[in-house]
Image (cartoon, rainbow, N blue to C red):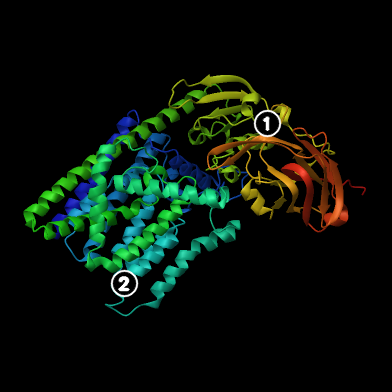
């Protein structure tokens, strides 16, 4: 009998997975395509690991900064060991891998339900497999599927330590939030195991070590607890406290809607009929199941854990992306509790076994309808992704091979990195651009980054975002190619960056040694920046539109009526020059949580006094700073020897940027 139940789980998971694979194949125009471009970045990392570039997209970037985890790129490395030139074949192999993960995860869920709850849970397992978010999350090509597999494997083998610990280890390195999952599993372990056998202290010690091991490793490699792929997404780094809390509650409501309806939290309620049916069936039934006395302890532990990870995911600027994949692995618990809720209702109403079978049939039909409706949303995304990928290849035909290209499209990076020198300015993938993660002001900052760092690039391919970064329009010489599809309006620009190559009136050769981008929270934190402004209403902070010079340079900054302090780095082996970019008049937009507040302000013109370690080193006149001006200040040699200098700027001005440039000493000095 048990073998028949296991076979039924395997068949159900296989059927669900095959239907998803067929949908991917046909919606991808008879080809294999991931619904989201994120998956392809892992292939790029894997390829670079194999060719010796390391944990990075570009050879000249710092290592260990961009991936959200280190496991998935490693898993993809063997794919490049096969002599496969057709990327469709590689994607197909990867999709088959995730199909197997779904099947084995389903078996682990069945084992967990049976052993932890001690009941016949075959129906609950099948319902769990049919939860839209859970099953679809296995086919994004992202690390959520591996995290889910290791999570359920750890629970399934709580009583078998030689199998429990390997699953626990891989869970620990599969996602940054694994530390919370491990603590949840330890609590379940104590609750279910301690009463039956002697508590083994090494289990708890191992779990604790694994829960913090990833953070220790990352801190040792990068100086940060979280990878660059995670930490810039935190709301509280990008918004004020009040705005972050408001945004958090908005995200929470969306996440809960996604749980109850089974859709992405970012999806509008266009399937309102299915949602209105699913909410009472899943939400109310699950609540009834959680309230059963037999499972009070488990319910409390699980719900506390669930709301902690829910709040954690909602604290990011991209909460709920990819059908709530970050919390999808917990959904089988809700389906289990909904199953018990049905049992409770049938018992209370004395409907008997026939009544319960009727209720479970109705519930299964509703879950199936919801699953297929979500599948339509999923396949629409696959179709769009395939279109974007094809358009990328079409646009590349207008670019000579070997040229440098700026793009916001991961498809360009994935498909054409061997043909062109590609720099991606999508804030989620480049460690350099990741500091510009805020949705607000990102286009201004991207434009600035392009002009500051990629001055020899001649082509810009816009493939994802609906807007062109501010400043690119004025740099455009011509549009070489354009897609007229209203859903994916992609464009290839030929650009001329010659007008914005900076000349700071410094002797050649000089090189950039240090910088502070004021108004950018990550740059400010790195340089221990503080500001003191006396303007009523504090119109300080992110500015959507900042300075413009020659219609090309854009930069957001802070309004200062008082002073600002920060730490700069110097190199005593060179001549050091402090370059200050500031202005005396503010005309821009103050932004608070997606609401644009026009705010025009003309500051009382005054001098800007610059102090280094309390010593006045410059007095700058702001009378001619209608937009902005750059001043070059030599740093006295006796101060430059300190390597880390405390700088204080006083006055009424707009603070945009600070740079330290170094110039080599001559041989006869």
Mark 2 touches mark 1? (CB < 8 Å): no
Residue 77 location in percent, x, y? 45, 47
550 above or below 337?
above
Q: Quickly name the residue at label 2.
A: 191
Quarter in which the N terminus is drawn: bottom left
Residue positioned 83% across, 48% down in the render: 609
**Gap between marks 2 and 1 measured at Cα:** 62 Å
Residue positioned 51% across, 21% down in the render: 482
Q: How many marks?
A: 2
459 above or below 359?
above
Q: Which mark is residue 456?
A: 1
Judged left or right of residue 267, residue 121 is left
Residue 374 location in percent, x, y? 30, 39
Q: Secondary structure at mark 1?
A: loop
Q: Residues within 10 Å of mark 1 (few under 14, many from 20)?
A: some
Residue positioned 45% across, 69% down in the render: 208
Residue 413 location in percent, x, y? 52, 35
Name, please, the residue furthest toward the front: 536
Does residue 18 appear anywhere in the picture?
no
Judged left or right of residue 580, residue 201 is left
Judged left or right of residue 121, residue 329 is right
Residue 175 location in percent, x, y? 44, 55
110 above or below 546?
below
Q: Secondary structure at mark 2?
A: helix
Judged left or right of residue 421, residue 331 is left
- State which quadrant residue 560 falls in: top right
153 above or below 506?
below
Q: Which mark is residue 78?
A: none
Name, please, the residue furthest toward the bottom: 198
The numbered mark, 2 or 1, whose residue comes first in the sequence reads: 2
């Amino acid at each position: 009998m048990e073998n028949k139940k296991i076979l039924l789980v395997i068949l159900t998971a296989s059927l669900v997975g095959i239907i998803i694979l067929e949908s991917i194949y046909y919606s991808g125009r008879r080809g294999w395509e991931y619904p989201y471009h994120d998956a392809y970045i892992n292939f790029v990392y894997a390829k670079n690991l194999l060719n010796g570039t390391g944990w990075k997209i570009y050879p000249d970037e710092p290592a260990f900064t961009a991936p959200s985890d280190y496991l998935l790129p490693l898993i993809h490395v063997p794919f490049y060991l096969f002599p496969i030139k057709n990327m469709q074949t590689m994607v197909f192999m990867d999709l088959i891998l995730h199909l197997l993960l779904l099947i084995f995860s389903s078996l682990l869920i069945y084992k967990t339900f049976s052993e932890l709850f001690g009941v016949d849970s075959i129906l609950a397992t099948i319902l769990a497999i049919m939860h839209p978010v859970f099953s679809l999350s296995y086919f994004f090509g992202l690390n959520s599927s591996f995290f889910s597999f290791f999570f359920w494997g750890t629970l399934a083998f709580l009583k078998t330590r030689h199998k429990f610990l390997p699953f626990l280890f891989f869970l620990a390195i599969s996602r940054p939030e694994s530390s919370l999952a491990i603590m949840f599993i330890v609590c379940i372990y104590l609750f279910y195991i301690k009463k039956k056998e002697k508590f083994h202290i090494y289990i708890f010690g191992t779990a604790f070590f694994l829960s913090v091991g990833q953070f220790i490793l990352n801190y040792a490699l990068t100086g940060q607890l979280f990878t660059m792929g995670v930490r810039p997404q935190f709301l509280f780094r990008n918004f004020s406290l009040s705005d972050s809390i408001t945004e958090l509650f908005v995200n929470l409501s969306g996440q809960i809607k996604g749980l109850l309806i089974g859709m992405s939290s970012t999806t509008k309620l266009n399937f309102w009929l299915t949602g209105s049916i699913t909410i009472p069936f899943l939400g109310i039934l699950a609540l009834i199941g959680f309230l059963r006395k037999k499972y009070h302890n488990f319910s409390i532990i699980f719900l506390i854990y669930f709301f902690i990870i829910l709040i954690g995911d909602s604290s990011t600027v991209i909460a709920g992306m990819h059908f709530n994949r970050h919390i999808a692995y917990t959904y089988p618990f809700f389906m289990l509790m909904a199953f018990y809720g049905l049992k409770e209702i049938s018992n209370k109403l004395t409907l008997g076994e026939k009544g319960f079978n009727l209720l479970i049939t109705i519930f299964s039909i509703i879950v199936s309808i919801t699953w297929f409706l979500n599948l339509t949303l999923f396949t629409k995304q696959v179709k769009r992704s395939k279109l974007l990928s094809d358009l990328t290849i079409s646009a590349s035909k207008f670019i000579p091979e070997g040229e440098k290209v700026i793009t916001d499209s991961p498809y360009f990076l994935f498909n054409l990195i061997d043909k062109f020198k590609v720099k991606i300015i999508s804030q989620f993938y480049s460690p350099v651009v990741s500091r510009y993660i805020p949705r607000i002001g990102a286009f201004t900052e991207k434009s600035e980054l392009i002009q500051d760092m990629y001055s020899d690039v001649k082509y810009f391919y816009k493939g994802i975002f609906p807007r062109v970064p501010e400043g690119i329009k004025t740099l455009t010489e011509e549009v070489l190619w354009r897609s007229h599809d209203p859903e994916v309006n992609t464009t290839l620009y030929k650009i001329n960056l010659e007008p914005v190559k900076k000349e700071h009136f410094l002797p050649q050769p000089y090189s950039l040694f240090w910088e502070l981008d004021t108004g950018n929270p990550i740059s400010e934190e790195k340089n221990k920046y503080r500001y003191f402004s006396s303007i009523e209403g504090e119109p300080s902070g992110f500015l959507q539109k900042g300075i413009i010079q020659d219609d090309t340079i854009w930069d957001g900054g802070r309004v200062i009526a008082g002073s600002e302090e920060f730490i700069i780095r110097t190199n005593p082996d060179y001549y050091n020059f402090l370059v200050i970019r500031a202005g005396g008049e503010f005309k821009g937009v103050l932004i608070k949580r997606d609401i644009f507040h026009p705010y025009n302000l003309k500051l009382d013109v005054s001098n800007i006094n610059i102090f280094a370690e309390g010593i006045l080193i410059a007095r700058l006149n702001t009378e001619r700073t209608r937009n902005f001006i750059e001043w070059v200040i030599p740093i006295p040699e006796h101060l430059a020897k300190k390597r880390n200098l405390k700088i204080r700027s006083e006055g009424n001005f707009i603070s945009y940027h600070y740079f330290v440039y170094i110039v080599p000493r001559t041989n006869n000095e």
